[in-house]
Amino acid sequence: MAKVLIATEKPFAATAVAGMKDVIEGAGNELVLLEKYTEKAQLLAAVADVDAIIIRSDKIDGEVMDAAKNLKIVVRAGAGYDNVDLAAATAHNIIVENTPGQNANAVAELVLGILVFTVRNFYNGKAGSELMGKTIGILAFGNVGRNVARVAKGFGMNVIAYDAFCPAEAIEAAGVKACASQEELFKEADIVSLHIPATAETKLSINYDLCNTMKKGAILINTARKEVIDEAGLLRLMACREDLKYITDIKPDADAEFAKFEGRYFSTPKKMGAQTAEANTNAGIAAAKQINAYFAEGCTKFQVNK
Ligand code: 3PG
């Protein structure tokens, strides 16, 4: 019997936790829960005797792994795994997995939802504009990017995309115009929606020069990671380009400085893209099943630290 910990600073919906409990206990494993913890010490204590951990954006570093003497597998219930120290996991012989695609629709719906809110002037009653006929540029055409394309088409938007790792033919096969480069995407789009992971290559890559090529009145929407934005550069640009807007569901470090651009900046208080009961259930249950499959059959299909 494996002991499985769900450790979430930002908890899953209760229905998702109930479903995960059924899946884990149904396979003869044990579930323990650490929700809304505020101190790392609570996490370090909770991991002491567990075999597996399910997390969201929770940080799992070498210190946590050192404290988790029995730990064999960490599953990030979600897409991005930049919160897990993969090198430390490999050094500790710990498998790290994610659950790709399981929360993608929730993020896509949030993108279009915040966009409507933005182009209607944050519902302040003044005449706004519409999304139909506007060009949305999707940076990275993974599960979230593809879902944004699907929903944006429903709004009658022109959809273009660029992905450094996805061939143009695969983008075009989804009925989306493929751009030849990130630079072309930024120049052509009325709205740029970021769906890149935070990696050594992408961190700080959305910078002053790139954003300055955006069209007059353009909107930059970030539901990916705050680390990809060069915040100092974007602040400098927004100070001289009074037409640009920055919208995000990940509060920037420089939130107070961005907030000075009234009417051109919006951030949700917490990362909310994947915060739906459906996304929590899809990602959480997928994570629970992956853990069962690992302990029952040694399955590591979704391992990201190979
Ligand atoms: C992801 O990478 O899956 C999303 O950013 C969602 O993250 P969250 O589970 O912390 O909301």
Image (tube, rainbow, N blue to C red):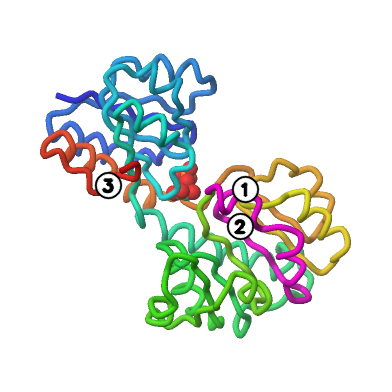
Q: Which residue is mark 1?
A: 226
Judging depth in this view, the residue of 304 and 285 nearest the camera is 304
Give the answer, above or below, for where 248 lies relative to 306. Answer: below
Q: Which residue is mark 2?
A: 222
Q: Estimate the spatial distance between the alpha carbons at disc 1 and disc 2, rounded to whole Å.
A: 8 Å
> What's the amino acid at mark 2?
Asn
> What's the amino acid at mark 3?
Ala
Q: Which residue is mark 3?
A: 286
From the Cβ of disc 2, is ligand 1 less than 8 Å away? no
Rendered residue at 44%/78% (across/down): 168
Q: Locate residue 234, reporting x and y percent.
A: 76, 56
Judging depth in this view, the residue of 118 and 230 nearest the camera is 230
Q: Is residue 245 left or right of residue 111?
A: right
- Residues at discs 1 and 2 in contact (Cβ within 8 Å): yes
Give the answer, above or below, for where 51 lies relative to 274. Answer: above
Dot 3 lies on which element?
A: helix
Q: Estimate the spatial distance between the alpha carbons at disc 2 and disc 3, rounded to whole Å.
A: 26 Å
Magenta-drawn stretch contains 215: yes
Dot 1 lies on which element?
A: helix
Q: Is residue 256 left or right of residue 205?
A: right
Q: Which comes before the other along the chain, label 2 or label 3? A: 2
What's the magenta region?
A: 199-226
| Label 3 environment density (alpha carbons within 10 Å; few <14, some 14–19, many ≥20) | many
Rendered residue at 39%/16% (across/down): 67
Q: Locate residue 214, reporting x and y percent.
A: 72, 72
